[in-house]
Amino acid sequence: VQQALIHLAEQLGEQDRISLVSYIDRARILIEDAGRQHVDDLRQAAAALTPEHATNMLAGFREGYWLASTSLARDRAEKRITRLCLLTDGLAELDERSGEQMSQAMQKAAAEGIQLALVDLSQGRQANRNDSPPPWSQAKPIRYLTAAGHAQTLAAVMEVYSSQPQAVADNVLLNVAFNPEVVAGYRLIGHEPSGGQLLGLDLSPPQQQATLYASGAATVLFELQLREPVQG
């Protein structure tokens, strides 16, 4: 999240403004109405974000809503879009009553003309755009995005900011060819479906699928077993 927000700060246009709110047991404004000239302050505010066990999501949203609503008239006068983006990994911790309160607060914000987005950072499941959002977040027109890891978080934040999808290619297949005279076997670090065993070159093609995002990259790391050099 920190790196995604720092990247966002560096992409701000001349008329853009951003405020950051953190929420643990209570909400706290880290920076308010910052523009492109406040990039260093935005970096420091993003760096101040630290993961905690407590997640008072409702308080965080309400504080963000207050900031958005107070700038709404000025944004309209200056022809800016007012967006409110909630990033959280604590959706599963929200009880039914709090979920209803969140839904009501979001409906109120949307009725006032604030564009809403929710980025689900839950790490316990594979994040993709086909995930079903929690029931309380289904109230339109909330934009629901999921993200797991730096690349997806950055893409989600930039999609909210730009209103443009950030995925430039899905199911990209990377094929790697090793010289069998030099390489006896390999292991794909971190993505090995064979239980971590070193594979012979004739058993499985070394390939990995990935989704590529704007300003992103796909990285693959292999462990190689090299053949003994031929003597003489």
Image (spheres, grey):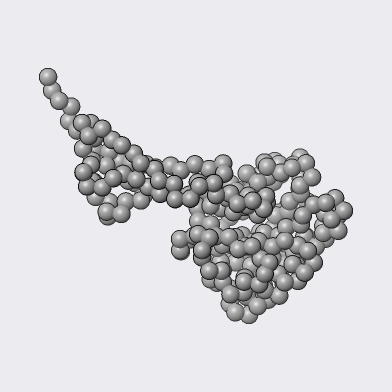
- Image coordinates for residue 159, horizontal then vertical, percent: 63, 52
Above or below 192: residue 112: below
Q: Quadrant of residue 231?
A: top left
- Image coordinates for residue 226, horizontal then vertical, percent: 23, 34
Indicate left or right for 96 with 212 as reference: right
**Residue at the location (43% across, 42% down)?**
219
**Residue at the location (53% across, 57% down)?**
147
**Residue at the location (52% across, 48% down)?**
151
* Viewport quadrant of the C terminus: top left
- Image coordinates for residue 22, horizontal then vertical, percent: 66, 59
Indicate left or right for 174 with 48 as reference: left
Which residue is the extreme one toward the left? 232
Indicate left or right for 52 with 180 as reference: right
Q: Quadrant of residue 43?
A: top right
- How many numbered marks, from 0 up? 0
**Residue at the location (15% across, 25% down)?**
230
Q: Is residue 46 visible?
A: no
